[in-house]
């Protein structure tokens, strides 16, 4: 009987010791979807843990997390000089994603700052070779140049850049007024050109009509009748100079009267 009690005490003690050992040396790590876990043992990097639950045995393990989701960063208000020495302010929108969390964490102290600085330098290098007038029409091409420049630097720190786009272009006030004057002059010139084209077309139509009437006198009478009918239907009074009749003379003879006006 005493032996059984002793065995139970030993088993209980052993079980409690095992529980203590398991609690002390067994570590469970949970990594959420969209993140990577960087596992360290006594400060030394061991491995990258993917999403899920991970069990590690031992002591002095630590885990840090790195976001792997796609995100965007705004590079705002960068003042740069164009090829024709015009100072502009441009903002960029960078879309990127961490592809190598270990390199992004260990190769640089602040990879977000390095990416920001790379975008600034790439913007200055790209815009410095472009004139201000071409800048607005080549925004897509500039974005492609920036992407190539920034990606080469981002690869060094484990970052993949999906796109670099020129978001805003801010001109100085005097340059805005100059562009507005140029645009106004272009619009006025276009309007004058359209008016001249319309007048030329009208003159050509009149010349063609004159030639047609000259070769077909009957059309003149038809056109006259149409005008008379239109004036009558509109309630207007049309006065035409027409050859008059004969005016009787005192001696009983008559003579042709001068041209008189007929009211319709």
Image (spheres, grey):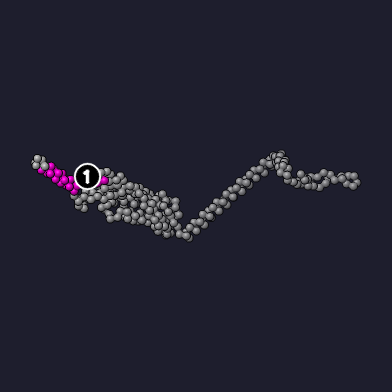
Q: Specify the principal SS of the magenta part.
A: helix
Q: How many residues crowd mark 1 within 10 Å: few (<14), some (14–19), many (20+)?
A: few
Residue 224 versus residue 128 in the image, above or below: above
Q: As rendered, which of 157 and 11 lies closer to the eye?
A: 11
Q: As rendered, which of 239 and 62 lies closer to the eye?
A: 62
Q: Quick one: which residue is furthest to the right in this view?
A: 251
Magenta region, residue range? 6-30
Residue at left 65%, top 45%?
Answer: 206
Q: Quadrant of the C terminus?
A: top right
Number of numbered discs present?
Answer: 1
Q: Is residue 129 visible?
A: no
Q: As rendered, which of 249 and 4 lies closer to the eye?
A: 4
Give percent across and percent down for residue 140: 41, 49
Residue at left 91%, top 46%?
Answer: 251
Q: Is residue 206 visible?
A: yes
Numbered disc 1: secondary structure: strand
Residue at left 77%, top 45%?
Answer: 263
| Residue at the spot of label 1 | 55
Give percent across and percent down for residue 119: 35, 54
Residue 63 appears left or right of 173: left
Give percent across and percent down for residue 147: 36, 50
Q: Quick one: which residue is furthest to the front in this view?
A: 1
Assess whether residue 41 is covered by the magenta stretch: no
Residue at left 78%, top 45%?
Answer: 262
Q: As rendered, which of 237 and 40 lies closer to the eye?
A: 40
Residue 58 appears left or right of 119: left
Q: Quadrant of residue 133?
A: bottom left
Q: Quadrant of residue 1?
A: top left
Q: Quick one: which residue is furthest to the bottom in this view?
A: 174
Give percent across and percent down for residue 170: 44, 56
């Amino acid at each position: 009987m005493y032996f059984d009690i002793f065995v139970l005490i030993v088993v209980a003690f052993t079980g409690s010791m095992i529980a203590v050992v398991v609690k002390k040396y067994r570590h469970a790590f949970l990594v959420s979807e969209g993140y990577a876990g960087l596992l360290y043992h006594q400060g030394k990097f061991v491995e990258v843990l993917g999403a899920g639950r991970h069990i590690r045995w031992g002591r002095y393990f630590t885990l840090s997390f790195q976001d792997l989701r796609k995100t965007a960063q705004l590079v705002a208000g960068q003042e740069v000089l164009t090829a024709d020495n015009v100072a502009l302010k441009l903002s960029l929108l960078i879309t990127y994603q961490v592809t190598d969390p270990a390199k992004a964490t260990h190769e640089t102290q602040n990879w977000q700052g390095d990416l920001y600085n790379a975008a600034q330098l790439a913007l200055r290098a790209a815009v410095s070779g472009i004139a201000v007038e071409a800048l607005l029409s080549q925004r897509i091409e500039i974005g492609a140049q920036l992407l190539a420049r920034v990606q080469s630097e981002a690869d060094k720190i484990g970052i993949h850049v999906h796109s670099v786009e020129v978001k805003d272009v801010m001109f100085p006030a005097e340059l805005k007024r100059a562009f507005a004057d140029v645009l106004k002059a272009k619009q006025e010139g276009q309007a004058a050109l359209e008016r001249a084209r319309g007048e030329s077309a009208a003159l050509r139509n009149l010349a063609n009509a004159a030639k047609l009437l000259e070769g077909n006198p009957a059309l003149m009478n038809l056109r006259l009748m149409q005008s008379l009918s239109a004036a009558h239907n509109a309630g207007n009074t049309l006065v035409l100079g027409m050859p008059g009749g004969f005016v009787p003379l005192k001696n009983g003879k008559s003579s042709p009267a001068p041209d008189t006006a007929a009211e319709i």
